Every structure is written in structure tokens, then in C-alpha cells.
Image: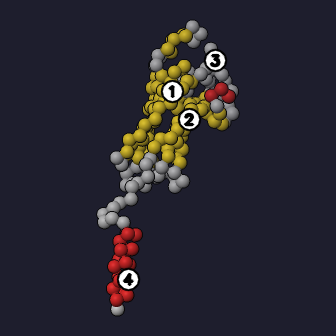
Amino acid sequence: MTTRFHLRPLSMGLVLFLAGPAGSVSAAPKVTISDIQAQVYDRQQGAVVAMDAASDPYGMNVDAFIVVKIQGTHEGDAPLKLKLLVSAPKESSEAAGDRPAWKVTQTRDLAVLTENGVTQVPFILPYHCASTVKVTATLTGGGLKASKTLDTSFPCAE
């Protein structure tokens, strides 16, 4: 009879240990923007290529192709929002003359991210030649706010 009483506290302790603290909630995996890549979609080749591999070196017949890589998983009640802001300041060159400043914004709702933890979200937008282009991706929702910036250029032969 003594053995039974000694095992009972031990088994209850083990159950409580495995259950964890009362009211504990496992932390959701952190979601971040891990990378931004800028390429071009070449309409003549019908493919995504590196910026210097486009069929037309003058920026004709191409679109900017931006991929935002998100690290982590999400299955909340509300979707995450991914906002892409791409902009370039006004510039002037002897060969091309004056170019106005420009800005393009696109937003995507992401209800669920991939199970393996790496989601790649593509954006396609007009390609405007510019020596200085700022690409900013912002991810919000569910108490999350993550942001990443890429400084690049959209080159054209002049």
C-alpha cells in the first residue's frame, strides 16, 4: 500500500511537468522579411532574367520583377498585409535628359504562409530607368510589423 502512495505523487508530478505551466501558450513563430530581389521580366524572351540580361538594353519591353522572401509561418484569423513601395527621385543626365520622380505601391494579402517557413511573394510593376531605386517591403498584421529595404537601380543604356 505504501508503494502506491509513493508512486501517485511521482506520476502526478510527471503529468504536471509534461503539461507545462497553467495558462501557457506556445509562442507563434516570428515572421520576418528575409530578402528582396529585383530582376526583370523580359517580354521578348518570356522569362525572368537578371537586369543586365534583358533583350533590350534601353529598358523597353521589360517589367520590373520584385520577389519578397518571407521567413516564418502564419495561420491567424486575419491575413497579413505585404506592402511594396518602389520609388526613384527626379534625375537628369546629359544622354537621357530629365526624368521625373516616380513611385509605385502594391499590396498583397497573405492568408497563410507556406508550411516550410519560406514564402516567396512576386510583384510585377512598370520598369522606369533610374540610377537610384528604393524598394521597401512592409509586412503587417496580427501585431506584427516588419520592414526591409533594397537600394538598387533600374539601368538603361544611354
Callout 2 amino acid: Gln
Q: Secondary structure at mark 2?
A: strand
Q: Quadrant of residue 47?
A: top right
Please state which of residues 103 and 67 is positioned toward the viewer in this rendering. Answer: 67
Mark number, residue 42: none
Callout 4 amino acid: Leu
Callout 1 amino acid: Asp
Mark 3 vs mark 1: give the one in front.
1
Q: Secondary structure at mark 4?
A: helix
Callout 3 amino acid: Ala
Mark 4 vs mark 1: give the one in front.
4
How far apart, in angstroms, are the residues tagged by discs 1 and 2?
A: 10 Å
Mark 4 vs mark 3: give the one in front.
4
Contact? badges 4 and 1 (CB < 8 Å) = no
Q: Is residue 123 above or below residue 96?
A: below
Residue farthest toward the front in the current orientation of the protein: 2
The answer to whether 143 appears left or right of 149 in the picture is: left
Q: Which residue is mark 4?
A: 7
Q: Position of residue 123 (x, y in %)?
A: 52, 37
- Quick one: label 4 or label 1, which is nearer the N terminus? 4
Residue 88 visible at all: yes
Mark number, residue 37: 2
Mark number, residue 151: 1
Q: Which residue is mark 3?
A: 157
Residue at horizontal 54 percent and vertical 19 percent from the top: 131
Q: Crowding at label 4, few (<14), some or many (≥20) Cα neighbours within 10 Å?
A: few
How far apart, in angstroms, are the residues tagged by discs 3 and 1?
A: 20 Å
- Quick one: label 4 or label 3, which is nearer the N terminus? 4
- Quick one: label 1 or label 2, which is nearer the N terminus? 2
